[in-house]
Amino acid sequence: MSTVSTSDLPAPGGAPLREALLAADFTPDGLLERLGAPAYAALARGETVPALRATRDGDAVAVLARLFLLRAPVPAKRAAEVLPLEAALEAGWLRRASGDTNGGHGGEAANDGGTPDAVRAAVDIRPWSGPGGEDWFIVSDAGHALGGRAGAAAGSSRSDVVLGVGGASTTLTHLIPDAPVGRALDVGTGCGVQALHLTRHASAVTATDTNPRALRTAALTLELSAAPTAGFHEGSLYEPVAGDEPFDLIVSNPPFVISPPEPGGPRLVYRDGGMAGDELCRSLVRGAADRLAPGGTLVMLANWEHPVDGDWRERLAGWLPPGCDAWVVQREEQDVTEYAELWLRDAGDHRDDPARYAARYDAWLENFEARGVRGVGLGWIMLRRSDTDRPSVLLEEWAHAVRQPLGPTVAGHFDLCGVLRERDDERLLAGRYRLVDEVVQEQIGLPGAEHPEHVVLRQHSGMMRALTVDTVGAGFAGACDGTLAAGVIGDAIAQLLGDDPAELRSRLPELLRELLEQGFLRPVD
């Protein structure tokens, strides 16, 4: 592995390049239109051959796609028609590739590389759409804007490689609440995509990473996207901001992979944190309360160990800092063999010498066995500093589909924690509530039956939960439009059904709490 260095990355000053990229319509919409839906979808899967075919005799968008996404050299004359060539070469965005016959993607790219005077990109640039329709650009190391079957890090000889946007980082962008905040922190910024999103709704953004190349790359991402600047600091976890004012929002896609120790330190900086087991994620969670301002929120991705004896929920409950409401969602559980294979492929080890691959695989399994680990959970951890001695803690498995973005759902969940904690039954019934959007009612029963056997409320947004209720529950939820207090609605339903109002009112708080906790209702007062 090579020594950490940033000297091969472009210099600041990307405004002329941004203007050229936009003028050529090198945007997500422009790429989709130019490549066609099948080739564009294949790029998202890390497959480049359809896009290479679609850009054989290309216009400006095709030239830029070949340079910055497909790693193909392009004739300098053609590049100069699209880009400020000399300025891009001088700043380090492009490099001369005269006589280069190794395009890196098969014969087609290789033929381009054989031109008398060619250039190739020093970094990847991926067009990215902001939530408000912004045209952004994500910078990453050459060949790493997109993953692929060869492994995200395959073909790289360096441990400090900086990847572009993958599935995990995209998920995190959709989990982050987007309400305006003062100070925001991105721990383990990588290519800077989270910091970029934070600039939309935070007054000040700080980004940290142990990898100097990542910090430099993230700065290029923000600059090329014409986003507000951020403060970049090198260091692990919260160390770089230990003396700073607390933050209103902390986000992190950390190096959460639970990998065996490597001689000489982490093998791949973007994924291997260098701590035993899931200690890195535990440290991030445990230390969050000290770095969050009152009411501040932490949203992070994590992996955690499932012990041979014991429940994973009990382990993670021990991570949670006091005075914080918590919501932990396990999206997937993998046994140790699945997990090892996933990350061995990520590093490209499956393309290595079979004996070397087998030795690495065995080292992963040996490490898990020695520590009594039977599986690994993959999911999300969210906290809000509530400074209460009665924090709300929800740890759940949810492998079902969700509808992104979930940022509003995360914010709404923590808002409800406070509401449910502060309101006793009487206050709860005095409140007014509204059924959230995109909830439908399904009735299940025999055809022609007078009453359905089951009534199910189903969300078509957010967590997309389903809740079985009786006719009272369905009628109550349907009547919640924010105009009447819950108790008044309950009394009206009792009168309509001929039930005892006092008896129905006595069991209404339990129903109401469940509808609120599951995200079917929201307070309007």
Image (cartoon, grey):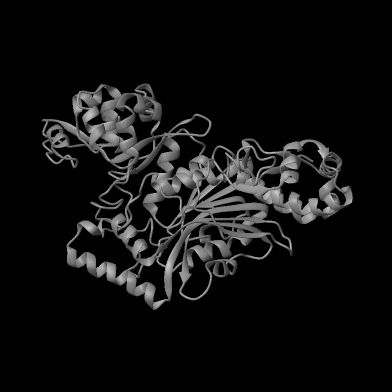
Q: Is residue 89 above or below residue 312?
A: above
Q: x and y percent of residue 288 in the render?
A: 59, 60
Residue 320 lies left or right of residue 98; in this view the side is right
Q: Which quarter shows the N terminus?
A: bottom left
- Residue closest to the eye, 344 or 66: 344
Q: Determine the image quadrant of residue 120.
A: top left
Q: Residue at x 52, y 34 (%)?
A: 131
Q: Is residue 234 above or below residue 444?
A: below
Q: Residue at x 39, y 28 (%)?
A: 27
Q: Residue at x 50, y 46 (%)?
A: 401
Q: Which quarter shows the C terminus?
A: top right
Residue 325 lies left or right of residue 187; in this view the side is right
Q: Residue at x 46, y 54 (%)?
A: 188
- Kindly tell me whether residue 115 is visible in this rendering: yes
- Kindly tell me whether residue 276 is visible in this rendering: no
Counting labels gives 0
- Residue closest to the eye, 359 or 89: 359
Q: Is residue 426 above or below residue 445?
A: below
Q: x and y percent of residue 68 in the render?
A: 29, 35
Q: Residue furthest front?
A: 448
Q: x and y percent of residue 412 in the render?
A: 66, 45
Q: x and y percent of residue 511 in the render?
A: 74, 51
